[in-house]
Image: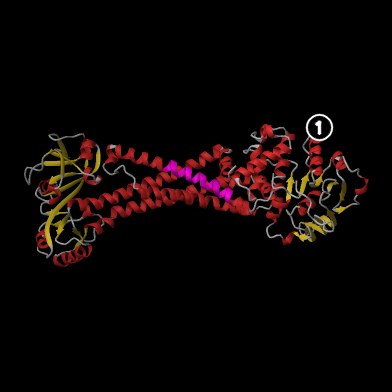
Amino acid sequence: MTEPTASPAVPLLEAVAVTRYFEDGQVTALKDVSLQIDSGDYVALVGKSGSGKSTLLNLLGGLDHPTSGAIRYRGKDLSEFGDPAQFRSSELGFVFQSFHLISVLTAEQNVQMPMFESSLRAPERRERAAELLERVGLTHRARHLPQQLSVGERQRVAIARALANRPSLLLADEPTGNLDSSTAESIFALFDSLHADGMTLLLITHDPLLSERARRTWTLRDGRLGEADDDAKPESA
Amino acid sequence: MWFLTVIFANLRGRPARSLLTLSGIAVAVAAVVSLLGVVRGFERSLLELHQGRGVDVMVQQAGRLQMTSSVLRESIGETISAVNGVVAVHPSLIEVLSLIQDDLMGVVVQGWSPDSGPVQKLKLLDGALFSGPEAREVIVGQRLASALGVAVGGTVELLEGEPFRVVGVFESGNVFDSGSMFVPLRSLQRLMFREGEVTMFAVVAERRDPESLRDLAARIRLGVDGKVEAEPADDLARRSTEIRVARSFAWLTSVIAVTIGSIGMLNTMMMAVFERTREIAMLRALGWRRRRVIAMILGEATLLSVAGAAIGVLASILFVRFLASLPASGRLVSGDLPVAAMGQGVLLALLLGLIGGLYPAWSAARLTPVEGLRHD
């Protein structure tokens, strides 16, 4: 996993007074949100439906632009990155609730998809995909199509894919939302293990079991970020 | 995994649509290649026809769209012969007849003097040349003989109750010649009640370079008392009405094929993009740049085009060979497709891929990840 390289003074990712309106200002999705995520953090973002969690994740991941305020990655405003796609490719990993695996590609091929934007050659891509599938315990399912995998296995493939370009930060939107409790538990364990390896994680979740395992939990209510209860967490899950 | 593997997997994953699009392109390419091939073969045959006969300048009635409708007095031949630089003049009457009893339409019957160059240069496979200038005899081209089912010693009724004896069968690499028959000029004039009339004069020139031939043609035009059109045979063949009509028809058909093919490709690729909106948005979220999305969609369109082109060209080769084997069309179609026509077919397919894939690719690349991930 990527070693944290940011200086302690500069957060890995930072939102400064971020506001996001939709429909010409009729709908306020986020209002004056400020936060910091440091290298090695394990943060859960909780909140009711419509509270603005996904909007915040999209902004932090460079998928959307704030109406006002700024998002900074290692102290640099995201708008200063020439191509947001390049930023996402090299620095971020995304995990979605619905996995979004490509049905006509095998597990191993799905994991390789983000690597087309890296400088890796085909044999290196294959080798890294095999390593990542081993990391998520799916070596034996590498040549299976998504529809031949269980939902838990699909999410593991999606996590392996998110790690394809060795990102500094993993963003996950309801990663256990479609999983039963025992399958969700295996995904929790995988996130714990990634965190233990030094990965920085920001997870949106409704699942209290997952938010409890995070080191910090933030709550969004009506587009405003609530108090962080950082210190209440034990060091290990 | 190679990028091409992704493109191939995307097409293989939607077999019905991919096959339908591929079929559409193949049909468009086959239609265009076949038509262009036949027209080019037609053109080449017409050019070779005169070259093979040693004819340098053709003289016909001015203002006629088609050579067969030209009518000239045979006596003009003497005036033409007197023009400086003319070595020989061969008058010819050309009729296009329908041999009802043999169910063959549009058979070209060429009336030439037995001692004329074109008759003397015939390569006989069987039989002999004409026995005299007024003999009721025909020498039949190999393809026509095959279509008529006649051989030396048989008869052909040029008009009802007017049998002509087959005295020879000739071979010719030229599809027109091979699909026609030769008759002594006098016999044909008499049969058609056109004594003293000819369709054209074939002139053999002393100097055969293009400049000299154009000069000679100009002098013939000036020397003949009457409205005639004299042109080097190659020039006349190139701008003949038949070729121009055939070319126009082929290009018109090509445009229709391109339009239909493009719409088919556009539809397929738009549907592919629409169905995969979330997938494309996810790829963008994972860091795929716009140009990679464009490359993927255009790659799919191009792969379909290339496969369609290969099938289309193969189908056109088989189709043209089939046409050449039929009695009715075999007299007009040589069965060989020029490489240029096949090249045009491949270019057409690539054009279809480009036209049909460009907009969907652009529209996929414009998709923002957030909008796309919300798409149902």
Helix, strand or loop under label 1: helix
Look at the image and give the residue range highlighted in magenta: B295-312
Does the rendering let one see residue B159? no
- Report whether B20 appears left or right of B34: right
B298 magenta-colored: yes
How far across and how far down the image is residue A46, in percent? Answer: 85, 46
Color scheme of the displayed model: secondary structure
How far across and how far down the image is residue B99, in percent? Answer: 21, 40
- Give the chain of mark 1: A
Q: Assign the magenta stretch its main secondary structure.
A: helix
Residue visible at 82% across and 35% down in the picture: A185
Q: Nearer the viewer, residue B130 or B283?
A: B283
- Mark 1 packing: few (<14 Cα in 10 Å), some, or many (20+)? few
Disc 1 marks which amino acid? Ser
How far across and how far down the image is residue B271, in percent? Answer: 59, 45
How far across and how far down the image is residue B60, in percent? Answer: 19, 58
Q: The C terminus of chain B lies in which quarter of the figure? A: top right
A57 magenta-colored: no
Which residue is most to the right? A232
Q: The N terminus of chain B lies in which quarter of the figure? A: top right
- Report whether B134 appears left or right of B283: left
- Report whether B263 appears left or right of B190: right
Q: Nearer the viewer, residue B30 or B2?
A: B2
Q: Nearer the viewer, residue A29 or A14?
A: A14
> Relative to residue A7, is residue B13 depicted above or below?
above
Number of numbered discs: 1
User: Where does label 1 land, which residue?
Assistant: A182
- Report whether A231 appears left or right of B332: right
Does the rendering let one see residue A37? yes
Q: Quadrant of residue B142?
A: top left
> Relative to residue B373, is residue B100 depicted above or below?
above
